[in-house]
Image: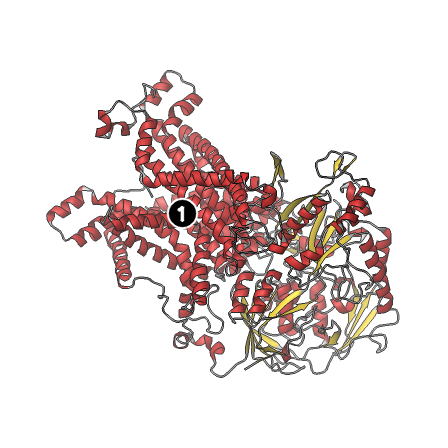
Amino acid sequence: MKPDEPPAPHALLNADELETPPLTIAQLTWRRFRRHKMALFGATMLFLLVLYAFAGTIFFSEAYANKTDTKARLQPPSAAHPFGTDTVGRDILARTIYGGQISIIIGLTAMLVETIVGVVIGALSGYYGGKLDSLLMRVTEAIIVIPQIFLLLVMAKYFGGKVPNITLLGRTFSGSVVVIIMIIGLTSWPYLARIVRAEFLSLKENEFILAARAIGTPTHEIILRHILPNSIAPIIVAATLGVASAITTEAYISFLGLGVRPPTATWGNMLEGAYNYIENAYWLWVFPGFLIAITVLSINFLGDGLRDALDPHSRAI
Amino acid sequence: MKTKPFLRSIAFLIVIFSLAIAACKPATPPPTEVAPPVEETEPVAPPVEEPTQAPEARKVATFIWTQEFDTLNPLYTNMWFSSITQQIWNCWAWDFDDQNAPHPVLVTEMPSKENGGISEDDKTITLTLRDDIVWSDGEPITSADFKFTYEMVIDPKNTVASAYPYDLIASLETPDERTVVISFNEPFAPWAASLWHGLLPEHVLRPVYEAEGTIDNAEWNRAPTVGCGPFTFVEWESGSFARFVANENYWLGKPKLDEIFIRFVPDDASQIAALKAGDGDLGTFFAYSDVPDLEAAGIQIIKVFSGYNEGWFFYLDPEKGHPALQDVRVRQAIAMAFDRFSLAEDLLLGLTQPAVTLWDNTPYADPTLEAWPYDPERAKQLLDEAGWIDTNGDGIRDKDGVELVLTYGTTTREVRQDTQAVAQQQLLEVGIQLELVNFDPDLFFSSYGEGGPAAKGELDIFEYSTTTEFPDPNMADFLCSEIPTDDAPEGVNWESLCDEELDALFRLQATQVDFATRQQTFYQISRMIFEKVYWLGVWQDPDLFGISGSLLNVKLSGATPFFNIFEWDLAE
Amino acid sequence: MTRYIIRRLLQAIPLLLIISLILFLLMQTMGDPLATMGGRTVTRSEDRKRLTRQLGLDKPLIVQYLYWLVGNDWTKLDLDGDGILETRGTRRGVLRGDFGTSLVNRGVPVTQVIWSRLPNTLLLMLTAEAFILILALIIGIYSALRQYSFLDNIVTTITFFFYSMPVFFFGLGVMYIFAVNFKKWGLPYLPTVGMFEPEAGKSTSQIIWHMVLPVATLSFGFIAGYSRYIRSTMLEVMGQDYVRTAKAKGLPRPQIIYIHALKNAALPIVTIVGLDLPFLLGGAIVTERIFAWPGMGRLFLDHVSRSDTPVVMGILMMIAIAVIVFQIITDVTYAWLDPRIRYK
């Protein structure tokens, strides 16, 4: 911590912590975090889910996940296919593994896009204020005003089929993955931008910023080294929850038929056709649906724990 | 601001009140123990509902449609669900029966050379109307209605869906109330399949046209209370249902059913559920995979061929297309490497079979042709002969540095996506790599001008189901003049194939009014497309209708499915 | 206050213009309305040429936007393609309340298309909203008053679980259990789709019966979210001085809770309800899809799939206006309810 910064207020709070040698922010955060049982549970579950999606590749090859066998279509769970098979006889277990990778990657990268755009716009808006602020905030409002799902559907069609398939590390991905990542990222940043803007508005009037400005610290340095680190807590929390909402959003668009295109599987697009089999083939929608639900739940628990740990003053919703 | 305390207390009271309600009633929706409240609806129902609830057995047949009509005006729609509904409430000059033979409805007999209905030079067709035909409101149907319909179609102020074939008509005369004389510039072979699909009542729409200059906004388009079918339109509630009741004035016979109730559901799953639960008597357009389920529930499945065949088109532009596809041997190899037989057997549950020609199940398909066999060994041999060999050992054949990687696109329909996955695997076995892409239908079918992927040549193989002017085999998809370019972006020959010989044959058949000569021309065309694999039939794509056991006397036709609906009945 | 409202409304105008321009641009390459026109074959080239001209789709983008915005009754159009401008336009433009006519249901005004579905969506949403508020208040207050009790922990966990569950998964799940399996087991089952059974007719009891699952699906996530919110605001308020004073005065407990505490705790809810409108609409689109509810969400999906620009624009603009108006109403209500807030 820099000497000219005020001590984080929560460092003074706990009586028992005053007895012990001074703790770093990270240690303090960890202390608070591990008291949050649900958050620990969420973190563990997430670890297992990531393990499932990425270590699963050791057991099943991607070719196997995409291998069709029309003779063995729509088979209920069995020893050969623990999660059953889909409409063209592909193994659902293997597909949830490869689909999970894409879903998680979509969640993480869409969150990155969201965070970058949100932080940049929020920071510029909050720090400079004035005309730039009102212009950026009008744009932000414009995006908030249209419900995200409506905007996504229109954008998914706009970009649909415009991005060619991508080959990466010897694997082919449908170009629609990129489209989905971009449109989710580009429609979900406004809330984050507002949070960041509010943080910047309040922080930029603090004495340590005024002091930094007085000694001629360049603007970018003030933003990046002084204000941003102090507003990192709500950003981390929002970003964590952003991963969950990106995964759900991908599933929504896929469910409505405009999501990631085959052959690339995601948990969301595995649900796409499953709706027609609600009565006869529950395994088509139960497994990917359950994985989405459990992932989102874990991330929300984690986010909740992080909020309490990093930012004890904020109120949980 | 004086009102503030008052409003605050109001707001507060609302909160308290809602709490009180919540306390008295644990949940707002009725508890699940309540039996489906069919019986108790009568007393609650508003009086408007009485037609659906009359006590003695009114015979109401319920149809389940997965798409809602866009409009009911027959000139304004291309939509299949709206077109098939026309047989219920509107009339064609002639229908097609379950053998796809035309039979007269508004005319006394089908025009022919023998009865003088078709002139010697094949250019003029004379219709003689029946004496007893009337609109559902009792007004007689006369040649003036035909003339009015024609005028509305070609009027530039009306945004009709298709002006075909009326924009080819040189003149339309009505010498008397019962005669319509249609003259074409050129002999026009497909007249029977394309003329008079629906008629407009002049006495209803003429005043609208004169007042507004167009019939685009006519109330009749959404509420055609005056019709000429066996049933008459009553109401259409957006997103929910449409109702048609028996037309007492129908001249071919009083309908046995009292009412047709069409219910709109958004997808196959709801349709299947409704049919299985007995909530519907007729449903259509569901997926093959739903058939066993329906049959298990006692629903009779009727396959009706309406000319649709699912198939692969190839982008054959000599410069911009993939070089491999220019070689007929590669296309033949593709045909033999793709096991369409087991696809039809497994994925389509044996309900259909590979298509051979674009005219399968019509008299125009050359019966001596048989689908390309599944023979991957022969396919490999052909590819070797054509010089496509895997030189770099990556499992994909190549030639002159070009890999045999083809982009294969289609719409997002589930069965097509499944087909893609299967084809990809099978073609890889002979060393052809398929890159799969899917598009929403309105993107996939976009024209060249709108940047449609198939029209623009971005797809080496594109799959969809298409039909001719069923039951007539005429089609424009292979004409050189239809190749889309920057100057003519609306062309429909997306293969960009210009085979002079094929082009000439297609142009010839359109003018051959005589059936036998035209049939021979089509045999030639079929054989040429088949042998050169300009199009590869994947499966015959019949319309599926599911019919409950209680619906009687049902006959279905490809072009006009409900041609005998006035004879349908419900079992007690 | 009046001046504040007027200022907010004036600010909304440029915002709506920006939104409309962005959406209009997005809409142009969303798809080709003339590709098949809902049919199963590609539109014939002559018809495509004619319709492009008649519907004005051949005009430059900016002109199309202008016609959409201000109408085209001040200019003449060439409908028959002879190069002569002879027909006067009939559109009056959005600014004069004319959202154009649908491309799918050609000739039918967009407003009419939307109005035919709007009541159904409103019915679903208002019922859901009432349901959400009532249940969230009960659950929220209950868990706040019995903080850290066994039941509170259970309720918190369950609400968290529901809060995280995607709408469609919940929808499919309840449909599978209460409609499909209840029927299989011979129990009284709920209907899966639609607003009423055709045989029974469109009666009140039928509609209520068919609303059970959609309303439950639409509201579960919000109940979970709101009850957690109410719980925390209640907890905060219960610790305030005036509540302590009320307790010290010996007021009856219900009076403290429902009059002193709840009144203040309910304030933030007003904001949330107002601001969550877009989310509720988003949930409605999925719910309407699953349960075949003939509302705006399904209308939107149907018309997006056929690239019906005027209708899609109409729906989105109306939603935008509704959301903005709701934001203003929320702010104003908040000011009315909370005497500490003054707008200038």
Q: Is residue C215 visible?
A: yes
Residue drawn 56% across the image and 52% down it:
A85
Spot occupied by residue A292 in the image (x, y as percentages of width and height): 46, 46
Q: Along the horizontal axis of the image, is A302 left or right of B229?
A: left
> Mark 1 packing: few (<14 Cα in 10 Å), some, or many (20+)?
many
Q: Is residue C216 above or below residue B390?
A: below
**Along the line of sight, which residue is nearer the eye, A76 or B515?**
A76
Q: Secondary structure at mark 1?
A: helix
User: Can you identify the residue that label 1 sits on?
Assistant: C164
Q: Is residue B513 above or below residue A137?
A: below
Spot occupied by residue B410 in the image (x, y as percentages of width and height): 66, 50
Q: Residue furthest top?
A: A215
Coloring basis for residues: secondary structure
Q: Is residue B388 above or below residue B497?
A: above
Q: Quadrant of the C terminus of chain B?
A: bottom right
**Along the line of sight, which residue is nearer the eye, A133 or A118?**
A118
Residue drawn 78% across the image and 38% down it:
B389
- Occupied quadrant, residue B349: bottom right
Q: Along the horizontal axis of the image, is A311 left or right of B111?
A: left
Spot occupied by residue A77 in the image (x, y as percentages of width and height): 51, 54
Q: Residue furthest front?
A: A79
Q: Is residue C344 visible?
A: no
Q: Residue furthest right?
A: B120
- Occupied quadrant, residue B130: bottom right
**Along the line of sight, which residue is nearer the eye, A187 or C139?**
C139
Residue kind at label 1, given as amino acid type:
Ser
Spot occupied by residue A116 in the image (x, y as percentages of width and height): 47, 32
Label 1 resides on the chain identified as: C
Number of disc labels? 1
